[in-house]
Structures are given as structure tokens and as C-alpha cells.
Image (spheres, rainbow, N blue to C red):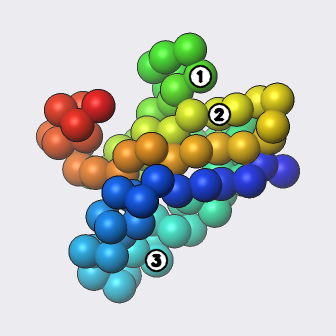
């Protein structure tokens, strides 16, 4: 079981979303506790960086295997997320 940590800009982004979408994203982020065992659209994009696709949103996170931690660096819409990386 991994510990999921959120960057402060992820928290700010989530605060701007409507309640239904925010709850949906939080549910997806909670599922990351079981990474790499979860079945989702996840692709490795760096040394320890991964991209998770959920609808029109993208979640960029680092998986720190030694510490059993997942650090969610960025959550944004598909068109914007890669420009912010």
C-alpha cells in the first residue's frame, strides 16, 4: 500500500473543480494507493514518472518504490498538462 502525496498546485486545481468532478478525481487518486496493481490507463513517461489518463484529465505522478510513496505532481486537462511539465 502506497502513501499518496499531493503537490500544492494539485490541491489548488482540485479546489477549482465542481463537487462531482472533484469527488471523482479524489476517488481515482485514492486508487493510486494500490499502484502498480491497479488496472488503469497508466504509462511510464520518465525514469520514475507516470501519466494516468482519466477522461479528459491527466494525472502526472512520481512513484518512489523504495519509500512506497506516490507524489502527484500535476493534475490538469489534456491540452494543458503537458505544457506545464
Q: Which residue is mark 1?
A: 48
Please name whichever residue, 17 or 66, is drawn nearer the observer in this view of the structure.
Answer: 66
Q: Which residue is mark 2?
A: 63
Residue in the image at 70% along x and 32% along y: 64
- Image height of 30 relative to 73, above or below: below
What is the CA distance from the residue labelled 3 to the residue labelled 2? 23 Å
Q: Earlier in the sequence, mark 3 or mark 2?
A: 3
Where residue 85 sits in the image (x, y, percent)? 29, 31
Left or right of 14: which side holds 79? Answer: left
Characterize the local packing of mark 1: few (<14), some (14-19) or many (20 or more) Cα atoms within 10 angstroms: few
Spatial distance from mark 2 to mark 1, Cα to Cα?
6 Å
Q: Answer with left or right where residue 17 lies relative to residue 5.
A: left
SS at circle 1: loop
Q: Residue furthest bottom?
A: 19
Q: Where residue 76 sits: x, y (%)?
A: 28, 51
Cα distance between the residues tagged 1 and 3:
27 Å
Residue 4 position within the rendered picture, expressed as x and y whole percent measured from the top left:
65, 54
Q: Dot 3: what SS?
A: helix
Mark 3 nearby-residue class (10 Å; few <14, some 14–19, many ≥20): few
Which residue position is annotated with label 3? 23
Which of the two marks, 3 or 2, is nearer to us in this view?
2
Residue drawn 17% across the image and 42% down it:
80
Amino acid at each position: 500500500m502506497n502513501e499518496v502525496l499531493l503537490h500544492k498546485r494539485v490541491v489548488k486545481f482540485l479546489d477549482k473543480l465542481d463537487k462531482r468532478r472533484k469527488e471523482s478525481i479524489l476517488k481515482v487518486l485514492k486508487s493510486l494507493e494500490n499502484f502498480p496493481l491497479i488496472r488503469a490507463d497508466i504509462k511510464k513517461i520518465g525514469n520514475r514518472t507516470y501519466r494516468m489518463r482519466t477522461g479528459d484529465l491527466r494525472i502526472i505522478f512520481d512513484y518512489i518504490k523504495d519509500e512506497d510513496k506516490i507524489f502527484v505532481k500535476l493534475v490538469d486537462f489534456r491540452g494543458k498538462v503537458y505544457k506545464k511539465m
